Image (cartoon, rainbow, N blue to C red):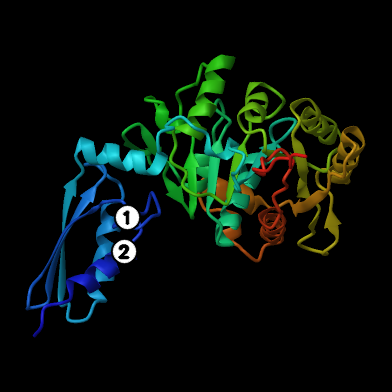
């Protein structure tokens, strides 16, 4: 029996992406050695970025599956090793270049769509909406990141069941992934866990957000969502400063009182020079389970009111992106870590969320504020 082709094995390994970095392990220098015997046994040595890599089992499974598909291979043995400090430094340089603290989404040439999900006050379901939109965008095949920018009241980790700590590689933070979404939050940076309060003043909040954006390895994202804290405080202002191309998405409920407060979150865009991508009305009317008539549990018309008031205040058309019917399963999914758009995709609320994600995901990136790399011709 001929020995499997080493070239074919290396070609197979080139199809294996690192689960965290999402690039081929051959490109990242993670393949240590390849040895093939005439009995079809292939031994593959793999370098992990760190000794406690949480993705070690996933990497082993991917390598085994890829190599087993090579002709004449009967068995695959994967031996794991750990990169040296020099290898990790080289990897960091390869991924980040010389600018370790750079915010890639703030660069003029960035094509990542950045949406800051805001609300005037708490209790409107903003975090649940944000998490489900992120998952829906990922289901569309987009590469998605989610920043839980609500430093004091972070809830995204529970909603997406993304409670694993990130992996640290030479100062780079590799965020955990859940349902295809890369997630970063304040949770893993608190030794006391969920119950430990965060006592930050304004400058520290700004620094925390800056670290989430610059120190985290996000990879090539199609969309980045930020779950902002309610109101128009430090984080909302810092988001505009650090991500000048970000667009606001305002979440409200049908209640008129909620709409009044939501308008304030949107009109902040006039001061921060941001664009408002649109308004989402959460907890809208839902059909009565007995008679089928719509029930306006939380009032009616709030979303349209916010959209029209923001259009008038900002002097530009602010659309109502969609109305999400009230559904207890949306809250239940957040408590259990199973997003509604996946657990109950046929539910009206899930369909509403997917429709909004379709709108945001296909939203063209404007050229305003971007350098085109051209200059007027001289005379």
Across and down, in percent, residue 359 comes to 72, 56
Q: Is residue 353 visible?
A: yes
Across and down, in percent, residue 196 comes to 45, 23
Distance (Cα) linking label 2 and label 1: 8 Å
Residue drawn at point x = 28 percent, y = 69 percent: 11
Residue on which the image places disc 2: 14
Towards the viewer: 43 or 161: 43
Q: Is residue 61 left or right of residue 366?
A: left
Q: Is residue 264 left or right of residue 24?
A: right
Q: Please, is residue 5 above or below residue 213 in the view?
A: below
Specify few, some or many for label 1: CA neighbours under 10 Å numbering under 14, 14-19, or 20 or more.
some
The residue at the far bottom in this view is 1
Residue drawn at point x = 50 percent, y = 21 percent: 198
Which quadrant of the structure image shows residue 89?
A: top left
Q: Is residue 249 left or right of residue 20?
A: right
Q: Quadrant of the N terminus?
A: bottom left
Across and down, in percent, residue 50 comes to 25, 41
Residue on which the image places disc 1: 27
The residue at the far right in this view is 312
Element marked by disc 2? loop
Towards the viewer: 61 or 110: 110
Q: Quadrant of the C terminus?
A: top right
Across and down, in percent, residue 321 comes to 78, 51
Which quadrant of the structure image shows residue 65?
A: bottom left
Element marked by disc 1? loop
Q: Are marks 2 and 1 in contact (CB under 8 Å)?
A: yes
């Amino acid at each position: 029996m001929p020995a499997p082709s080493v070239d074919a094995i290396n070609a197979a390994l080139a199809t294996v992406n690192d689960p965290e970095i999402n690039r081929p392990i051959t490109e990242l220098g993670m393949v240590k050695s390849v040895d093939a015997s005439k009995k079809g046994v292939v031994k593959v040595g793999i370098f992990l970025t760190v000794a406690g890599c949480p993705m070690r089992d996933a990497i082993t499974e991917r390598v085994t599956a890829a190599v087993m598909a090579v002709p004449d291979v009967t068995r695959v043995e994967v031996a794991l090793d750990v990169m040296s400090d020099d290898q990790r430094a080289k990897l960091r340089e390869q991924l980040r270049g010389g600018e370790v603290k750079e915010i890639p989404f703030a660069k003029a040439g960035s094509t990542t769509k950045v949406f800051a999900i805001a609300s005037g006050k708490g209790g409107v379901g903003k975090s649940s909406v944000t998490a489900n939109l992120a998952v829906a965008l990922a289901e569309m095949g987009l590469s998605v990141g989610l920043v839980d920018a609500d430093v004091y009241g972070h809830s995204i980790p529970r909603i997406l069941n993304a409670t694993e700590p990130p992996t640290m590689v030479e100062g780079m933070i590799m965020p955990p992934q859940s349902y295809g979404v890369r997630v970063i939050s304040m949770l893993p940076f608190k030794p006391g866990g969920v119950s430990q309060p965060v006592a930050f003043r304004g400058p520290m909040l700004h620094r925390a957000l800056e670290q989430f954006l610059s120190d985290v390895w996000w990879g090539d994202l199609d969309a980045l969502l930020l779950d902002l804290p309610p109101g128009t405080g430090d984080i909302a202002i810092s988001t505009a400063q650090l991500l000048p191309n970000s667009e606001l998405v305002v979440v409200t409920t049908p209640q008129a009182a909620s709409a009044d407060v939501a308008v304030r979150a949107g009109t902040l865009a006039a001061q921060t020079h941001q664009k408002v991508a649109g308004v989402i009305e959460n907890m809208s009317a839902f059909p009565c389970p007995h008679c089928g008539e719509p029930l306006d549990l939380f009032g009616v018309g709030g979303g349209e009111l916010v959209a029209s008031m923001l259009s008038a205040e900002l002097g530009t058309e602010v659309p109502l992106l969609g109305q999400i019917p009230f559904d207890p399963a949306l809250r239940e999914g957040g408590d259990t870590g199973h997003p509604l758009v996946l657990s109950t995709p046929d539910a009206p609320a899930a369909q509403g969320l997917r429709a909004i994600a379709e709108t945001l995901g296909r939203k063209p990136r404007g050229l305003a504020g971007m350098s085109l790399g051209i200059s007027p011709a001289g005379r």
